[in-house]
C-alpha cells in the first residue's frame, strides 16, 4: 500500500480538478466493491426474505380475517338475542315480587328462545342469560364457573354499556366468552335499563382449526394473543402457554426472527382492527436460513476487510480535498457572524498556487467580500432614503371627507349661533390643517398627537354636542414618547363615524394608556355598536372599505412597523353591542425624531 501511495506525487493530484479527484476515489471504491458478490447476493437475499414475509403475511391476513368474520357472525347472534322482543318481554316481567314458580316458567321460556339461536351454531358451547335477580337461563352446556368468575363477567359486560365485551380463556374457563348487557327498549320505552347479562361461550379453537384447514399454518404455526395472553392455541394443561414476546422487539415492524421454545422462528404478525388481537405466524428459521446466514457472514467479513482498505486509500485522497475547503468554510463562518473584513485573506495562505476549483473558489470568495463591503456602504444611505419616502407616501393619504363635514358644521353654526363658536372651530380646523399637511416631522410626541386629537374633538363637540362624551386618561410622563404623526386622530375619527353617527344615545370615547415591560400601549375605545366577527376579520386583514380620514388601520400599522420594527403595531377588539377597542403599541423609550 505504501509504495502505491508514494507513487502518486502530491503535486500531481493536488492540482487535479475536484471532479477528477472524486471520480478517482469513486472508481477505486466501486471497482473493488464490485469485484465481490456481496451486494448482489445481499440484494437477492433481501428479495427472498421479502417474498417469504409477503407470503406469510398474506396467509396470516387471510386467516385472521376468516377467524374474525366468524366472530362477527357470533357477535351478530348475540345482538339478535339481546334485541329479541320475546326475551325483552320475559325479562321485563321478572321482579322481586314474582312468585318462584312464575320465575321458573319465565326462565324456561327464555331458555327455549336461547336454544333456537344456539341449535345450529357449531361454534357455540353455551348461551347463558343472567337476569337482574341473578337467575340463569342456559342453552347448551351449563358452565361451572366460580362466583368470582361470574361476577367478573358481569362487571366486564357493564363496561360495554350494551356492546359486546370479549373475555379471553383462562385457567378456569377455556372458552372464549362474548358478554354484553341486555337493556330495555321494548315498545316506545327506550330507557335502556339493564334487564340481564348475556354470556356466550365459544369454541375458539374449532374456529381457528376450521379456518386454517387446508393452509400451511398448521397446529402450532399460529398463535393468537391479547395483552400478552395466549388465546390460541389453548393450553391443555394447568400451566399457561407463554406468549411470544415479539411486540416488544419488533420496533413497529411486522416481522422478526426470535427464539421460541428453544428454537429460532421467522415470525410475522398482524394486529386486528376488530378486536385488537395480535396474530403471529411461526416458520422454523434453521431449516430455511442456516446456509444463507453462513454465506452472509462470510461475505460480510470480506466486505468489512475490503471496506477498511478502501477507507485507508480514501482518507489519503480526502485530505488533499478537504483541508482547503475547511479553511474556506471557517472564513465563511466569520462572514456569517457579520465580519466582512479582508483580514487574513491577503497573506500567502489565501493566494494559494493551486489552480483547481478550490483555488478559484477562494479567490472568487475574496472578491465577493470586497464587493459586499462596497455595496453595504452604498446601500445604507439608499435604504434610509427609501424609508423616509415610504413614510411620506403613507402619511400623505388624507381624505378630504373630514374637511367637508367640518365646513358644513361651520356653515350651520354661522346661521344659528354666535361668532365665538365659529372662531373656536376655525382655530381648531386651522391647527388640524397645519398638522396634517406638514411633512417636516414623521414622528411627533404623544403630547403633540393628543393636541391634534383635542382640536379635532373640539370641532366635533360643536357638531354633536352632548351626544359626544370624550375622556382622556394619559399619564404625563408618557407625553414625551414618540409615535408616527396622525396615529390617534384617525382612530378617534373612526369611533365617531362608526359608533357615534350610528347611535341615538351619547357615545363615550376614551383614550387611555397602560404600560408593559418595554412598551407603551395607547388604547382608543368606544361603546358603539361594535362589529361582527366576519367584518372584524376583514378589518384586521385590511380588506374592509374605509370611511372618514381614509387612513386605515393597515396604514397606521405600516408606519409603526417602519418606525419601530416588527414588535410593535396595531391590534383591534370588537363585539356586537359592546363597542370597539384599538390598541397602539410603541416603545416605552425616547428616540430621535427622524427615521
Image (tube, rainbow, N blue to C red):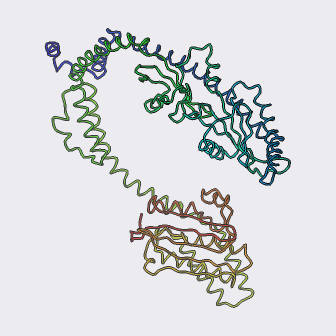
The residue that appears at 72% across and 31% down in the rendered structure is 140
Instruction: Say above or below: 465 vs 328.
Output: below
Q: Nearer the viewer, residue 331 or 574?
A: 574
The residue that appears at 61% across and 33% down in the rendered structure is 273
- In this image, 591 relative to 412: left or right? left
**Residue 421 placed where, x, y %?**
65, 88
Residue at the limit of the structure toward the right, as seen here: 187
**Residue 392 placed where, x, y %?**
50, 62
Query: Where on the picture, by quarter, is residue 406?
Result: bottom right
The residue that appears at 77% across and 37% down in the rendered structure is 81
The residue that appears at 18% across and 39% down in the rendered structure is 346
Residue at the limit of the structure toward the front, as seen here: 101
Q: Nearer the viewer, residue 321 or 26?
A: 26
Q: Nearer the viewer, residue 102 or 276?
A: 102
Query: Where on the picture, by quarter, is residue 286?
Result: top left
Q: Which quadrant: the C terminus? A: bottom left
From this viewpoint, is residue 44 visible? no
**Residue 264 placed where, x, y %?**
41, 19
From this viewpoint, is residue 468 visible? yes
Amino acid at each position: 500500500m505504501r509504495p502505491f501511495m508514494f507513487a502518486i506525487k502530491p503535486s500531481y493530484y493536488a492540482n487535479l480538478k475536484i471532479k477528477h479527484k472524486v471520480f478517482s476515489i469513486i472508481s477505486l471504491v466501486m471497482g473493488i466493491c464490485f469485484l465481490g458478490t456481496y451486494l448482489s447476493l445481499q440484494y437477492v437475499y433481501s428479495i427472498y426474505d421479502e417474498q417469504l414475509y409477503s407470503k406469510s403475511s398474506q396467509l396470516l391476513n387471510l386467516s385472521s380475517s376468516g377467524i374474525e368474520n366468524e366472530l362477527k357472525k357470533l357477535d351478530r347472534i348475540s345482538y339478535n338475542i339481546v334485541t329479541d322482543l320475546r326475551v325483552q318481554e320475559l325479562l321485563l316481567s321478572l321482579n322481586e315480587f314474582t312468585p318462584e314458580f312464575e320465575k321458573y316458567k319465565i326462565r324456561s321460556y327464555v331458555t327455549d328462545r336461547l336454544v333456537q339461536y344456539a341449535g345450529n351454531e357449531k361454534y357455540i358451547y353455551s348461551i347463558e342469560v343472567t337476569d337482574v335477580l341473578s337467575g340463569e337461563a342456559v342453552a347448551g352446556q351449563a358452565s361451572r364457573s366460580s362466583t368470582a368468575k361470574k361476577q367478573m363477567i358481569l362487571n366486564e359486560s357493564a363496561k360495554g354499556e350494551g356492546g359486546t365485551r370479549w373475555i379471553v380463556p383462562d385457567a378456569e374457563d377455556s372458552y372464549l366468552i362474548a358478554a354484553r348487557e341486555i337493556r330495555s327498549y321494548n315498545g316506545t320505552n327506550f330507557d335502556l335499563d339493564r334487564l340481564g347479562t348475556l354470556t356466550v361461550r365459544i369454541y375458539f379453537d374449532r374456529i381457528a382449526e376450521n379456518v386454517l384447514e387446508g393452509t400451511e399454518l398448521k397446529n402450532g404455526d399460529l398463535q393468537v394473543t391479547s395483552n400478552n395472553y395466549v388465546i390460541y392455541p389453548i393450553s391443555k394443561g394447568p400451566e399457561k402457554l407463554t406468549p411470544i414476546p415479539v411486540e416488544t422487539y419488533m420496533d413497529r415492524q411486522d416481522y422478526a426472527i426470535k427464539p421460541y421454545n428453544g428454537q429460532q422462528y421467522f415470525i410475522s404478525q398482524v394486529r386486528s382492527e376488530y378486536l385488537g388481537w395480535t396474530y403471529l405466524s411461526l416458520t422454523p428459521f434453521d431449516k430455511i436460513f442456516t446456509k444463507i446466514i453462513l454465506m452472509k457472514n462470510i461475505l460480510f467479513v470480506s466486505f468489512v476487510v475490503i471496506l477498511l482498505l478502501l477507507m485507508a486509500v480514501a482518507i489519503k485522497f480526502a485530505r488533499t480535498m478537504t483541508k482547503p475547503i475547511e479553511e474556506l468554510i471557517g472564513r465563511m463562518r466569520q462572514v456569517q457572524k457579520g465580519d466582512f473584513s479582508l483580514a487574513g485573506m491577503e497573506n500567502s495562505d489565501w493566494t494559494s498556487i493551486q489552480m483547481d476549483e478550490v483555488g478559484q473558489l477562494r479567490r472568487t470568495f475574496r472578491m465577493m467580500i470586497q464587493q459586499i463591503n462596497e455595496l453595504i456602504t452604498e446601500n445604507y444611505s439608499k435604504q434610509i432614503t427609501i424609508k423616509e419616502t415610504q413614510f411620506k407616501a403613507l402619511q400623505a393619504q388624507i381624505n378630504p371627507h373630514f374637511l367637508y363635514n367640518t365646513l358644513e358644521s361651520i356653515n350651520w353654526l354661522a346661521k344659528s349661533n354666535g361668532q365665538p363658536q365659529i372662531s373656536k372651530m376655525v382655530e381648531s380646523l386651522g391647527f388640524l390643517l397645519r398638522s396634517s399637511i406638514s411633512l417636516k416631522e414623521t414622528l411627533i410626541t404623544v403630547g403633540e398627537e393628543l393636541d391634534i386629537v383635542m382640536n379635532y374633538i373640539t370641532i366635533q363637540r360643536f357638531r354633536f354636542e352632548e351626544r359626544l362624551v370624550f375622556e382622556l386618561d394619559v399619564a404625563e410622563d408618557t407625553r414625551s414618547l414618540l409615535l408616527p404623526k396622525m396615529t390617534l386622530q384617525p382612530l378617534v375619527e373612526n369611533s365617531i363615524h362608526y359608533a357615534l353617527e350610528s347611535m341615538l344615545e351619547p357615545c363615550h370615547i376614551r383614550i387611555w394608556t397602560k404600560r408593559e415591560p418595554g412598551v407603551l400601549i395607547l388604547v382608543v375605545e368606544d361603546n358603539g355598536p361594535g362589529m361582527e366577527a366576519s367584518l372584524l376579520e376583514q378589518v384586521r386583514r385590511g380588506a374592509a372599505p374605509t370611511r372618514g380620514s381614509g387612513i386605515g388601520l393597515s396604514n397606521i400599522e405600516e408606519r409603526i412597523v417602519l418606525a419601530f420594527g416588527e414588535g410593535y403595531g396595531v391590534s383591534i377588539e370588537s363585539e356586537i353591542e359592546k363597542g370597539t377597542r384599538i390598541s397602539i403599541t410603541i416603545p416605552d423609550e425616547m428616540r430621535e425624531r427622524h427615521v
